[in-house]
Image (cartoon, grey):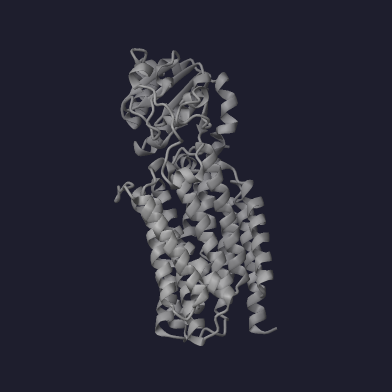
Amino acid sequence: MSAADVTSVAYLAAAVLFILGLKGLARPRTAPRGNLLGASGMLVAVLATLLDRSIVDFRVLLAGLVVGSAIGAVLAVRVRMTGMPQLVALFNGFGGGASVLVAGASFLEVVDKGRVDDQLAVAAALTALIGIVTLTGSLVAFAKLQEVLSLRGFRGQGVLRALLAVVAVASATMVVVSPGDVGWFWLLVGAGALLGVLGTVAIGGADMPVVIALLNAFSGLAASTAGFVLDNPLLIIAGSLVGASGVILTRIMCTSMNRSLFDVVFGSMAAGGVVADAEDVYGDRVTSTSAEEVAMILEVAERVAIVPGYGMAVAQAQHAVRDLMRTLNDAGTEVVFGIHPVAGRMPGHMNVLLAEAEIDYECLLDMDQVNPTFAQTDVTIVIGANDVVNPLARTDPASPIAGMPILNVDESRTVVVIKRSLGTGFAGIPNPLFAADGTLMLFGDGKKAVLDVVAALLNA
Amino acid sequence: MTLLIALTLFVLAVFLGMELITKVPATLHTPLMSGSNAVSGITLIGAMVSAGTDHSTLTTVLGFVAVVLATINVVGGFLVTGRMLAMFSSGRRKGS
């Protein structure tokens, strides 16, 4: 068997390991092993590539591996769970960036040797465009999530974006028509870079889960098209697996917000929509409560549901919420968590935050599991969530969030909402839940409010 | 590899990916994303060839940067996924 055959067989093994790894990630019990399988697939692929006969100098290559491993390890060990969306965005971007560079280097090499065919030129142009949009889009998403950048959209952004798209398509065409002029390739990369920035800069915080899922799909797709450039089946297979996964997550996130991908990327809230006046909705019907009163209600409750939103993470209240859960459990009260698919800054983010606070994942119910149980729930505690529990989505077809799937917390006997004020959520509309008969508002900082309730429970 | 074979691989892998991922519960979406993200760092093997081939200084430099970026993606991605999944399993032990 030649060295090339060994490499091919190793790539096949790596592809199988990736598939088994993704399959393992489908269940909490098998997920750690799935991750290990994926990592070993990567190791097999890297070792097999070292056998490649076109590699003549290992110094640069090994230096790159060492530097990259060190940076990656530090980032992975240091990141806090609240910062996970930023980190995943950053890694997405780096993957996309690497694909552009690989396609670029490979393209330049064949151009120099005068052996460009149409397939290679088309694949290189696609990789350059998708990869660079992934890179700059991810960097902007990272900066927005990290809150170092708070740019919004600007007038004329749509026109500029359309112009850039035309430049990108034109230069991509020229890359194929006249591959010898590598200037077109770099023009394509430049236009794509600006497109990535303009495409993400106007996207609001609550839409971030969609953006991150979409960038995840792009990074996979870029790896896959790079596989067409390099004629490498492993890149094609692994890249398309990831691309498919990103597409599915993007679709789930869009459905959960009742927003089309178009609306998210082009920055419009659902068309039209009549925003009710806050005064009409709240009037003097909002009932404010105290930690002691909440504790008294909780003492007699048999079943409690907690609905966390991103506000809980902002208040760093996860551990306080866990204490509340344990206190209630010790008193024999059943506690579950109801988690909306977009209750964080990336898909599944809330689950990770609660898992970090050592809350058993079996208590974390998704929307379809928890919704039928609210009618049998004595007390539902909403902390840091707003739009995802707004009954207007169900009742008012004229509302901007009409039709968005929500958690039907208003079906439970009593609802306690822990919130700083009556301020609106991302959708910018008032929430009739806060003025409903069975709702008590506990105003204040999320963490302090929960700790006060725990203290009141323990003192009783 | 002919274009037709490459396209066949692409289409079949997309379908396989859809089948695999649709079964993942919402609880695991974040680790799924960071884990699959690490897999997309497979570009690394292309970058290694670019960095190691003695073609021109420019392609070597591009290859080096690509190796660094892809390695960050791969190593960081798998490590952070492992960190998250460890939290899920420790939560489980306490609960049961």
Say which quarter of the image contains residue B1.
bottom right
Tell me if residue B28 can be seen: yes
Q: How many marks?
A: 0
Q: Residue at point 48% right, 72% down?
A: A174
Q: Residue at point 41% right, 53% down?
A: A199
Tell me if residue A132 can be seen: no
Identify whether A360 is placed above or below A6.
above
Query: Which of these two is toward me, A274 or A427?
Result: A274
- The quarter of the picture where the C terminus of chain A appears is top left
Query: Which of these two is toward me, A340 or A10?
Result: A340
Identify whether B21 is placed above or below A395.
below
Residue A280 in the image: state x and y as whole percent: 36, 17
Residue A86 in the image: state x and y as whole percent: 40, 52
Say which quarter of the image contains residue A226.
bottom right
Query: Which of these two is toward me, A251 or B24?
Result: A251
- The quarter of the picture where the N terminus of chain A appears is bottom right
Residue A320 in the image: state x and y as whole percent: 39, 33
Say which quarter of the image contains residue A421.
top left
Q: Residue at point 64% right, 81% down?
A: A4
Identify whether A406 is placed above or below B58.
above
Question: Is A212 on the left-hand or right-hand side of B5?
Answer: left
Residue A20 in the image: state x and y as whole percent: 65, 58
